[in-house]
Amino acid sequence: QLENVTIDRFGRVRRRGGTTAFGGRPELPGGIGKYVDNDEIEFMLGVWGNDIYRSQGDSGWAQIATDVSLQPDLLHQFVPIRVGVNQAVAVGSCEQTTTKSQLSIYDVDSDAVTQASLFPRCIAAFQNRLFAGDADTLHWSEIAAPVAFSNANNLLIEPGVGGKITALFPTREENPRMLIFKEDLIAVFEPKWGASSSFIATAGDALDTITSKLRVLNPDVGCVATKSVVEVSGFEDGDILFLAKDGVRAIRRSATDSQAGAGLPVSYDIPDYIDRINFSKAYRAAATFYDNAYHLAVPMDGSASNSHILRFDLQTKGWSLQNIGAKDVMSGRFASSHRCFLQSPLRTNDTSVTNAVGDATLPHQLFQLYSSSKLDPAASKINWRVASRAFAGKDMGREKRWDSLKLLMSSGDTAIVEVGYKLNQGPTLTTATAVVTGSAAGSVVLGVDPLPWQATDAVLRQFPYNLADIDPGYIFQVELGSVTSASDFGQVSLYFMEFSSFPQQNKFEADS
């Protein structure tokens, strides 16, 4: 159990970084996105109220697309696309509600907005067309004209089966294909166009319904949240992660570059967290890929908005829970720095922003997550908690006598850490607290500073605990948590002796 911490492949546990405010608005938040202009400059987009605002990754937000009128407080999706030779961004809402925003196309080069006659649940750019899903119907625009939809350019996707279309995702395939997610079904669409049944369409080509393929990958598993679908890199269990009704799942790619059905949930080992998700509002979940991890903002414990972030490390395959809410999450490279952002679902009293008009003391803000800050919005302390695995030695069935526990910790502050333990899955008992005092010494410059070198703020300190008074048992778990201030720690080492019928075989063991 990891809350507000991360753990790397070496077993080092660290408190997560805090947040830094990056501008805000007093209107209701409605999602964030990004695009890259013709000069290869990455911009961030955000919806507040009915309008769209733009930033270059700083706290200065300017309103764009003044002709657009979106539905406030809905989560919106942003899809870069071309309008002729101009860069554009398609914007549409993606919530399971009867009221949706009208599909809008913002032309970046002309700062003009046009609106299509659709109110879709999800959109995707594919083969220089804009595709949109609404109920059972898949719509597509003309080439390089993302507002030009017609009654002829649509296809029913397994009508009456699997619920409504929730997400569209083009795949990296030998042939052009697109995944179509419904609430309880996943299909793959392989279109061919025109009289020649070409994979590459030209202007005016209609769908060849004879040679095009629509194949159901999984008739029982689907996606419940449009913005939970994220392509990840380097994950052996699949290329695409998404939130299904039974947890987070992955779609694998085979050696022949084709899709197989969704495998078992990659979240199978965190059932307690999955059970806490409010699936009646899970369509508001949003995800991003950052720092080799899948970050999924979800509503938990009955909340109607995203109240927590589930972080899945692709290298360690470990999950952690981040106790911070997010209307939307996004990662991007702004000002040569790759960062993770969240749009707050709640008003905060953090006033360290610019360009906040109206009720400037309580804006709905955008925050950089995992920054060097040690605090969350409204100067909230980041409380962390860790429950270790069960230490059982080589034989679960043999009793052990516990000798000692050693913590390796570091902090630049004075901090009190609560230390507790569980014996044989019993209740948690607190044994003591560790006080970590930061050093005032500065950093050492090798080759410049003479010996003796002094300790730096990040020096590791050992905290041993005598466990001789604790009853013998079969398994032993350690629980740690912050009390006054957050600290980082390296490893937890447990020393114990396994009992044997032959005294000469009794020996001390160590586990970390």
Image (spheres, grey):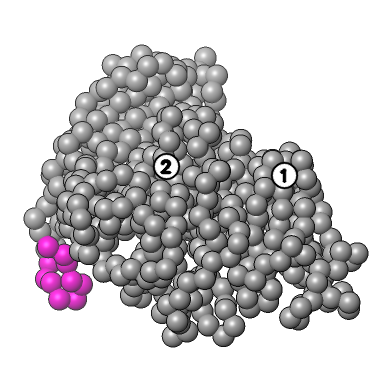
Question: Which of the two residues, 430 or 79, is positioned nearer the viewer here?
Answer: 79
Residue at 59% of width from left, 43% of height from top? 224
**Would you say 441 lies left or right of 411 here?**
left
Of labels 2 and 1, earlier in sequence is 1
Q: Which mark is residue 112?
A: none
Instruction: Check the picture and name the quadrant holding the N terminus.
Output: top left
Mark 1 burial class by Cα count in 10 Å: few <14, some 14-19, many 20+: many
- Which amino acid type is marked by label 1? Leu
Which element carries disc 2, helix, strand or loop? loop
Residue at 49% of width from left, 33% of height from top? 278
Quadrant of res 346:
top left
**Disc 2: which residue:** 306
Main secondary structure of the magenta stretch = loop
Residue 447 magenta? yes
Residue 81 higher or lower than 269, as above or below? below
**Disc 1: which residue:** 185
Query: Where residue 385 sits: x, y (%)?
Result: 33, 35
- Which amino acid type is marked by label 2? Asn
Q: Could one spot residue 106 in this view of the protein?
A: yes
Question: What's the magenta region?
Answer: 442-451
Query: Where residue 432 sits: x, y (%)?
Result: 21, 26
**Would you say 29 lies left or right of 257 here?**
left
Query: Where residue 426 sits: x, y (%)?
Result: 41, 16
Residue 378 higher or lower than 47, as above or below? above
Q: Could one spot residue 401 in this view of the protein?
A: no
Mark 2 burial class by Cα count in 10 Å: few <14, some 14-19, many 20+: many
Residue 327 higher or lower than 456, as above or below? above
